[in-house]
Amino acid sequence: MKSNLLKYTLSLAFLISTMLIAISVGSVSVPIPEIVKIIGSEVFHLPIGNDVDPKSISIVYDIRLPRVILAGLVGASLAIAGAAFQGLLRNPLADPYILGVSSGASVGAVSTLFFNISIPFLGMYTLPFLSILSALATIMTVLFFAKKIDKTMRVESIILTGIIFSSFLGSIISLIIALTGEELQQIIGWLLGSVSMRGWKYVGIILPFLIIGGLLLLMNTRELNAMSFGEDRAQHLGVDVEKRKMLILAAGSILTGAAVAVSGTIGFVGLVIPHLTRKLWGPDHIHLLPLSIITGAGFLILTDLLSRTIISPQVLPVGVITALVGAPVFAMILLKQKKAKGR
Amino acid sequence: MKKFLQVLLLALLAGFLIGCSNNDSGNEAAPNENTTNEESAAEGTDGDDSAYPLTVTDAIDNEVTLEEEPERIVSLMPSNTEITFALGQGDKVVGVSDNDTYPEEVFDIDKVGGMEFNVEVIISLDPDVVLAHESLVASSQEALDQLEGADIEVFTVADATDVDTTYETIDNIGQVVGAEEEAEQLVTDMQADFAELEEITSEVAEEDRQSVFFEISPSPDIYTAGQNTFLDELLQIIHADNAAGDQEGWVEMDPEAIIELNPEVIISTYGSYVEDPIGEVTSRDGFDAVDAVVNERIYDVDSDTVSRPGPRLVDGAREIAESVYPELFDEE
C-alpha cells in the first residue's frame, strides 16, 4: 500500500506539468515569462507593458488557456464517471457512454447541426444546450425503462437497457449522417470530439455540472466500495442500494452528458483512466475517484496537446489521439500486472 | 456501438482525405491521356459532319463507343452538368445528381442520387451516355459496372483540380455530347476572362498584395485550402497570397496558427449553410487580433463556384478578386 500523500503528489505533479507544457507549447511558441505576464494582466489586471504582442495575448488567453482548461474538465468528468460506473456495475468494460447518454447527447448536437437550429438568446450555445437537454432526457428514459423491466434494477438490466438505447440512438445519428449534405464535415468533426475553439463560455457550461456530479459521486465512495462486494452484501452493510444506485447513475450521466455536450464524444478516457488509476494506486473508491479526476484531466490535456502539435499547424481529432496513446499504455500496464502476479 | 460508429466515421473521413490526395496525384496522368484521345477523336471529326460512331477513351482508360450523338444524358456530378449546360446541351440532360444546384433548370430534372446513385433510376431514364466522374470510381465502382452491364455507355470525366485540367474536361465532354465547337469557344471565353482578371489585378503593387485565408468549414473545425486546390490557383491568378500556402490540399488548421498567420482577408465558403458566416468569424474569441477582423475584411463566396471544376470558376475568381481588391473594380 503506497502512502496516500505519494499518490496525490504524483498525480497532481502529472496534472500540473501537463498543464504548464500545454499552455506554453502550440503552433505559436510564446515564451513562459510572456505567458505569466499575459495571465497576470488578464486575470489580475496587472500592467502588462508594451513589449507583448497583442496576437500573443489573444492566442494564450482567448484560445489556448480555455482550451487546456476545458480539456482538463472534460477529462476529469469522463474519468470520474467511468470510475463510478465501473465500480457500480462491477463491469470492467463499463465506460461513461454505457448508458447511451453520449448517444443521446450526440443526437441533440447532430440534430442541431443538421436542422441548423438556432434558439434566440442562446445563439452558438444552442448546441451544448440542446445536447445537455437530450442527454438528460436519455438518462431519465433509460433509468425509467430499466426500472420498468426490472424493479430491483439489477446490473444486467441496466447494461442491457443502456445497450438498447445506445444502438437505437446511434442509428438515428447514422440516419442523419446518411441524409446530410454540406453539414457532413461539421457533424463528423463534432462526433470525433474536440475541445478546439470553445472558449471560456464552454468552460462555464461544464464547470457547474462537474462540481455537482463530482460532489455527488465523491459523497458515495464508501457506498461504491460496499457495492463492489455485491449488492446483497452492500444491503447487509446498511447501504440503501436502490437509492444510491439511482444517485450514482444520475450523477455519472450528468457528468457524461455535459462532457459530450461541450466536446463531442471523446472515447477511451472514461474507460481507461479508471483502470489505469486502479492499477497504479489501488481499487479503494475513496481515493480512486479523486485520483481519476486528476489523472483524467492531465491525460486529456496531454492528448489534446499532442493532437494540435504533432502535425502543426494542422490538427488531428483528439479522440483519435486518446485511443492511440491510451490503448498501448493500458496494454503495457496490463502486461506488467500479469507479470507481477505470475512471479 | 459508439466506438464502432467512431471508427466508421474516422474511416470515412480518412477515405475522404485519402481520396482527395489520390485525386491530386491521379491527375498528373489523366490530362495526358485526355489530350491524346482528344487528338485521335479530332481526326475522326475533321471534314466529316457525322463524328459518330465515335470511340473515345475516358479518364480511367475505358473505351467508350457512341453510335450516334447522344440525345439523353445523365450526369453524375454537378460540374459535368454545369459544363453540359454551358455547352448548350442542357435540354438533353435527363438525370442529375442530388447535389446539383446549377443552373436552375436542374431542379426540374430527375435526380439519380448523391454519393450513392441509384442504378435502377439511371437505367429507367434510358440514357445514351452517362457522364460519370473520376472521383466516383473509388466509391461507386460496383454501380458503374452495373450500368455498363446494362449496356449503358459510361464516360468517366477526369477529376480536375486545376484550371487547365478543367479546360480538358470541357473539351472531353464537348466531344462526347457533340458540342466540340461550343467547348472550344467556352474554353476560349474562360481563358479570356481569366486573362482579364489577371490583367486588372496585375496593377497591385508588390507591397499591396493581400494575404487571404480561406475557410472551408466554420469553427470549431476550421478547414482551409492549401496548395493544389482551385482556391489557391484562383488566388495566384488574381495576384493575392494564400495565407495557408505552406499547406497541401485541404487541411484542418489550428486556430492559434490562423491568428499567427494574421491574414489581411478571410474568405469563407460556407455561407450556404451557416446563417451568418461573417459573424461566425468575428465572434470568435481571440480573433479580434487578426487584421482581417480588425479591418472588417471578411467575405463569403459561393463554394460551388470555387470548387466545381466547371465554367463558373471564372465567376468564383471574379468574386474573390472583387472582395480582395475592391478598389480595382470600383473604377470600372
Image: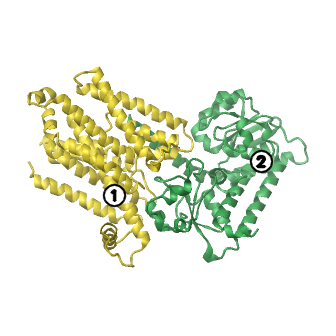
Chain colours: A yellow, B green
- Give percent across and percent down for residue A9: 16, 57
Q: Quadrant of residue A52?
A: bottom left
The quadrant in which residue A236 appears is: top left
Q: Position of residue A304 (x, y in %)?
A: 36, 54
Quarter of the image for residue A306 reads bottom left
Q: Which residue type does callout 1 highlight?
A: Val
Residue at 55% of width from left, 47% of height from top? Answer: B19
Gap in angstroms between the C-alphas marked 2 and 1: 52 Å
Determine which residue is flagged by label 1: A68
The residue that appears at 24% across and 32% down in the rendered structure is: A246
Image quarter (top left, top right, bottom left or bottom right) of the C terminus of chain A: top left
Q: Residue flagged by tag 2: what amino acid is it?
A: Ala
Q: How many marks?
A: 2
> Which residue is at 41% across, 32% downward?
A169
* Secondary structure type for disc 1: helix
Q: Position of residue B62 (x, y in %)?
A: 69, 40
Disc 2 + disc 1, Cβ < 8 Å? no
Chain of residue at mark 2:
B
Residue A209 visible in rendering:
yes
The kind of secondary structure element at disc 2 is helix
In the picture shown, does residue A309 fall above or below B93?
below
Apparent side of residue A240 relative to residue A209 in the rendered image (left or right): left
- Is B225 situated above or below A174? below
Taking A15 as reference, is B285 left or right? right
What residue sits 79% from the left and 37% below the top?
B92
Q: Return the residue at label 2.
A: B86
